[in-house]
Structures are given as C-alpha cells and as structure tokens.
Image (cartoon, rainbow, N blue to C red):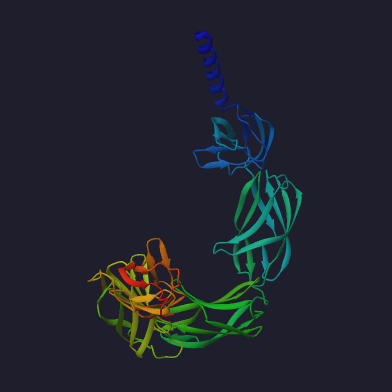
Amino acid sequence: MKNIFKVSVFIFLLSFSGIQAQTITSVDPNEGTQCQQLSIIVTGENVNFMQGTSSVHLTQNGSDDIYPENNTVLNINQIQSDFYFSPDDQEGSYNVEAWNGSGYIVLNNGFYLNPVANLPQLLSIDPDTALAGEAFEMDIIGEFTHFGQGYNQNVWLNSSYGSYLLNSTLQVISPTHLKVGFVISSYSAPGSYSLYVRNELDGTLVMQDAFTLLTSSSSPELTSIIPDFAYQGSELTVTVTGRNTDFTQGSSLFYLVNINSLISPSNSTVINDTVITGDFVINFDESVGYYDVLASNYGYGSVSLPDGFEVRSAGSAPQIQTITPETAQQGTRVIFQIKTINTHFEEPGNPVSVTLVKGWEELYCHDITVVDSVTFQASYIFSHANDTGWHDLIVYAPLDGTLRLDSCVNLLAPSGEASVYSVVPDTASQGDTLIISVTGKNIVFMQGTSQLNLTQGNLTLSPTNQTVVNDTVITGEFNFLVNFPAGKYDVNVDGGYAWPSLMLPDGFSLKLFDFIGE
C-alpha cells in the first residue's frame, strides 16, 4: 500500500512539474530578410496564449527590439505575429520573447534577420526648389524601394535648425515613385531642407539638403522695433511692425530671445495685422547684449529679426547688504530688516518677495513692509518642523531681478520647551457657557492649525468656536452641558505636524451643577 502511495505521489509531482514548464518549441519561419513582410508562428508547450493579453517580439542585445504590427492567437500553444522588417532593423540573431499575460517565455537566438541584397535609396526629387507661401507637387524617385507596400507612408522636409515641412497629399505611383503635395506657409523658414521618406519596409530614407525653400515677396518679415533697446531695471512698451505678418489678437505674440534668456511681455496687444505691442520689464536677471525679436502666429509659424533689440547695462546691479537679526529660533515670530543697494522697492508695479532656503526647504514670509526703496521688513514664523542651520536669503522684485545672500540666517532649536502658561478662567460649572483663554510660552499659535480642547479620560470637549488672539493666546467658547462629568480636565492645544502639542494636566476644573442656586 505504501509503495502504491509513493508511486502516486511521484506521478503527481512529475505531472505538476510538466504543467509548470513553459517553453517555446519552434519558430516558423526562423529567419527573414530586411525589406520583408513576414508572418511568424511561435509554438510553445504549456504557454496558455490568450487573445488580447499575449504577444511576441524579437530582441537583440537586450535593447534592439522589433515589434509586430499585430498578434493573433491560433490556440493556447500557438500565436501568429506579423512583422515588417526594414534596414533600420539590425541584421543578426534575435531572441524570441513571448508574453502570455503572466511572464515572458524566451527562446534564445530563435530568429535570424538577414541583410537585404539591394538597399533602398532615394534617387531624385522634382522640383527641388519652391517659394515660401507656394503650393506644389513633388515627384520622388527611389531605387529598390517599396512605396505603398507598408501600411504607413510618411514624407517630410526638415531643416538643420529644426523647421519641418509636412506633406498635404500623397499618391503612390509605383513602388519606386511617389507624388507628394506640399502647401508651404509663408512663415516657413527659407533655406536648405533634407527629404525624409519612411515606411515599414524601407525604414527611414534620407536625401540630405535635397530641397531649397526660397523667400518670396509674400514672406512675412519684421521691419522695425521701437524702441530697439532698454536698460536693465526699466519698464517699457515695445512696438513691432512687420510686413505680410497677419497678426491676430489672441494668436500672435512676440518675444526677445538670445542664447541665455527668453524675455516675454507681461501683456501683448495687436494694433492691426502688421503692428503688435508688448509691455516688458527688463530686470537685472536679463543678460546684457543683443536679442532676436521673435514674432509667432499660432498655426502659421514664426518670423524673427536677428539682433533686433539690445539690453544695455544700467551700472551696478542690485544686491543685498545686510539682514538683521541673523539668528532665529524655532517656535518664534521674527521680523527681519533687509537692506539692499540699487533697488527700487517703492516703485509702482515692483512688489518684493522673499524666501529663506536650506536644501530643498523653502520658507516664505507672512507679510512684508517696504520701508524705503532699498529697505523692507519681512515677518517670519518658524515652526518646530523647519530645518535648523544656516539659510540662504533670496529676494525678488520685477524691476530688480533676483538678489541672493548665502548662509545669512541661522535657525536654532528653541531655547525653552513650549508649554501652556495660564488658563483663564480655570473653573466652570455644569451648564455654563464661557470663553476660556489659554496663554502659551515658547510657541506661536496659528489660526487654522492650532486646536484647543479639554480632555478627561476618553472624553474630549471641543469649543463651539475658537480664535487665535495673538502668537501666544488662543481662546475657545465652551458649552458645558449638565451631564458632562465634573472634575479635573487636561487643557490641550494640538499644534498639527509642524508644532508641538501642548498639555496642562488638570489645568481646568468642572464643578457640579448648582441645583440650590437654580
């Protein structure tokens, strides 16, 4: 009997092991050639292919992958994958990887891609020149090409500086002849363009600098910029006049651009189809030198006037001189006085902002008071969650740009422990409604963050409303029902994640309802 049981277990384990072994047994065909459309049938054992979740792809060197256009599951152990191979795909051995929804089954070196005998190439185009704003048809002649034999055929022209011209129509005359229509915007940049033709069998074919786009009389241009310069730290309105520009409100913008900066207007106004204005603030963050004026028409393109605007130096740049005090403690409010030179804080439209930075942490002030054109005060509240150590000071104003003073404020740990200092009143009777005032020490109470309550055991009494009176005083209105337990209550102020929670044990007493007095 024991022997029969052992044999049964052995057969079961053998059967179970066989079920778990998932392998690819064949790939048919197991080789192909570039420029070939090929359907491959992958057969496996115990692979459980399912339509919609199973797929096959070929991989070489772990990175050069070829994916089929579609996968069709023939049965649970067979899947057919339809591939297009082009010269863009590297020749050589490929691993066959099948996905069955739960993992990959791999047959190493299961497929070989052979090189095509005659590489497809582009021979000629006609015409090879056109005018901006023109519509025309181009004949493209290739050799050993397969135009129209893939499911997708793309043609475009590309300049070395990134301008694209896309075809509007495409007609396949033969596998080696395409007729392609282009409608060239008058905004398209003149110059040399390379021709790109792509399909699944030929891959991407390129004819370098095959086409030249010429400027026409209808090409847009910028004719004047007024004014054509500004000094750092100035506000101005720039008027751009063009020809054939078709400026439209809401669709047209212009910028000042150089290798270091892009200056955008705060507001743009289209006066007519050839005139647009922009309001600019040129601060000391902008580099000195010449800028291209770039006007953009959405949906059409852009036109530029190289070196059309100059930013000139205004002399000494704004900078921070001092900040006082230089130290602060967690759990305190501090008013810093910041002195600068060459700034314009009193100028209209030049609001100042300030940030203290340490690593990833950025601390923003609660309010700012401008004292004069070079001095302002910033009120900060430092929580117990703020990082201690030296902080950098960053000041920004639209006219002055960005000012920085490194390692100028040292945030220290609190000198004393935060605590509840007093509770007034500290007694009440059942049935009373009264406002309790809690004063803290070494703490800053925050409206919306600090929460006052009274606790006795598992019972928590919350105020019907509360008010942060100042940094160290918080009040709450409590309604003590006659059925609330009499006795001692702890006074608590929950500070949230950034502030310590305070508790004064037995800080409040609730007395029994005075029935005789009633």
Instruction: Determine the residue located farthest toward the left in the rendered image.
Output: 415
Task: Note whether 109 is above or below 7 in the view shown.
Answer: below
User: Which of the two residues, 196 or 131, is positioned nearer the viewer here?
Assistant: 196
User: Which of the two residues, 420 or 403, is positioned nearer the viewer here?
Assistant: 420
User: Which of the two residues, 444 or 401, is positioned nearer the viewer here?
Assistant: 444
Residue 39 in which image quadrant: top right
Residue 259 in which image quadrant: bottom left
| Count of picture labels | 0
Q: Is residue 79 left or right of residue 340?
A: right
Task: Note whether 358 is above or below 307 in the view shown.
Answer: above
x, y (%) of residue 476?
41, 77
| Residue appearing at x 40%, y 67% in the figure | 485
Q: Is residue 127 in sight in this rendering?
A: no
User: Which of the two residues, 504 or 38, is positioned nearer the viewer here?
Assistant: 504
| Residue appearing at x 52%, y 19% in the figure | 13
Q: Is residue 46 left or right of residue 458?
A: right
Q: Is residue 157 in sight in this rendering?
A: yes
x, y (%) of residue 233?
41, 86
| Residue appearing at x 67%, y 55% in the figure | 155
x, y (%) of residue 241?
60, 85
Which quadrant is the C terminus positioned in?
bottom left
x, y (%) of residue 160?
55, 62
